[in-house]
Amino acid sequence: MLRASVSALGCWLASAVLLGGSAAVRADVISDFYTGQTISILVGFGPGGGYDAYARTLGRHYGKHVPGNPNVVVKNVPGAAGMTLVNMLYNISPKDGTEFGTFDRTIPLEPLLDGSKSRFDPLKFGWIGSPSSEVSTCVGWHSARAKTADDLRQTEMIMAGTGAAADATIYPKIFRDILGLKFRVIGGYQGAADSILAMEKGEVEGFCPWGWVSIQSTRPDWLRDRKINILMQLGLRKDPAHPDVPLVLDLAKTDADRRALELVLSPLLFARPYAAPPGLARERLDALRKAFRETVQDDAFVTEAKKIGLQVDYVSDEDITSVLKRMYSTPQEIVDRVKRSIH
């Protein structure tokens, strides 16, 4: 009996050593690949906006969390609010773990709502995570005639729009057609920074969406001096710091209206998504995900992000995938209604 127990223990120890050795070999293989390599973090907007700020902050810390400590560079690939980048990531980018990117959070909805310009399946991307979740806003310049969401039922507001699939274009159209708010979108702006400058210059009267944290970090004087009016909050819940600003979901008059709004607002839960091309080897994708999680939870990253006004609220790849699956299970009649609103 003793010999049998010793023999069994020996087998267990041998197995443990082998398993541990296998893990070490996998780590060494990842380290060997990334040593001397460069990882490119691609941003689907021009420089200066929130997506760019998060990516550049991430890039300064990310490499030390990847085995082999590769160099990390951030590259801007503007075009159609990130649609250019998404199609490139899915169809052209190398599938070896040296490129991944961030783009407008509503783009994963595009194949569901249109598909004419999308050449990707959002459920097949190698989702990495997001550094934040978000409650956003619609804002109007102080000189605009409409000062509140209720005013918008009677008074038109001209909004800055970016790409056709961008939330800055989609959200005002949805709110116009489902809630009866009189938004008119002028497209062609490159991103949030460009759109906000256009509002300040008087080319347009408002911008939507604009995150609470971004406003507070980049334009605190506009809040203090009442240069902008916060028309409503966008999300599935209110920011508790601003209880007096109405939540757009609360403006819905019917359950069907609310469900349509929930479909387009769900991406706010993964506000700044990062994805790798499909087909990436699982070991490398896992390494990128682990490095992303460790970076976003790294005190040095958090400190720098907060210093420049970026909210940090890690969202995992599993959470992103779960939200996407829920979005893609929306009843067809609700999807069709949203389609009619944005086209």
Image: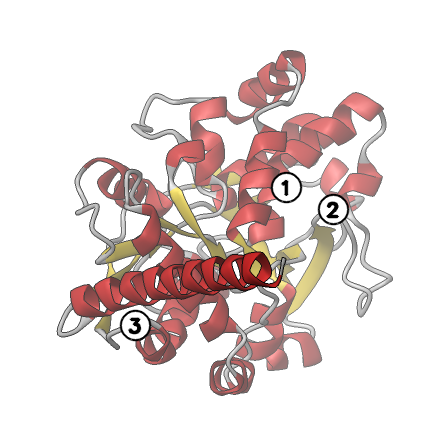
Badge 3 element: loop
Q: Name the residue type under label 2.
A: Leu
Circle 3 residue: 67
Picture residue at 33% right of the left edge, 29% below the top: 118
Circle 1 residue: 266
Give me the disc on residue 188.
none
Q: Earlier in the sequence, mark 1 or mark 3?
A: 3
- Relative to 220, does residue 180 appear above or below in the rendering? above
Position in image of residue 343 (x %, y %) = 48, 22
Q: Name the residue type under label 3.
A: Pro
Disc 3: CA contacts within 10 A as few (<14), some (14-19) or many (>=20): some
Q: Name the residue type under label 1.
A: Ser
Res 69 quadrant in image: bottom left
Badge 1 element: helix
Front-lying residue, 278 or 2: 2
Cα gap from disc 2 to disc 1, whole angstroms: 7 Å
Q: Quadrant of the N terminus?
A: bottom right
Please say whether residue 50 is visible from this viewpoint: no
Q: Earlier in the sequence, mark 2 or mark 1?
A: 2
- Relative to 181, does residue 240 appear above or below in the rendering? below
Picture residue at 57% right of the left edge, 44% below the top: 267
Badge 2 element: loop
Cα gap from disc 3 to disc 2, whole angstroms: 37 Å
Res 107 quadrant in image: top left
Please say whether residue 52 is visible from this viewpoint: yes
Position in image of residue 71 (x %, y %) = 21, 75
55 left or right, relative to 314: left
175 left or right, relative to 31: right
Picture residue at 62% right of the left edge, 23% below the top: 329
Position in image of residue 66 (x %, y %) = 32, 71
CB contact under 8 Å: marks 2 and 1: yes
Circle 2 residue: 236
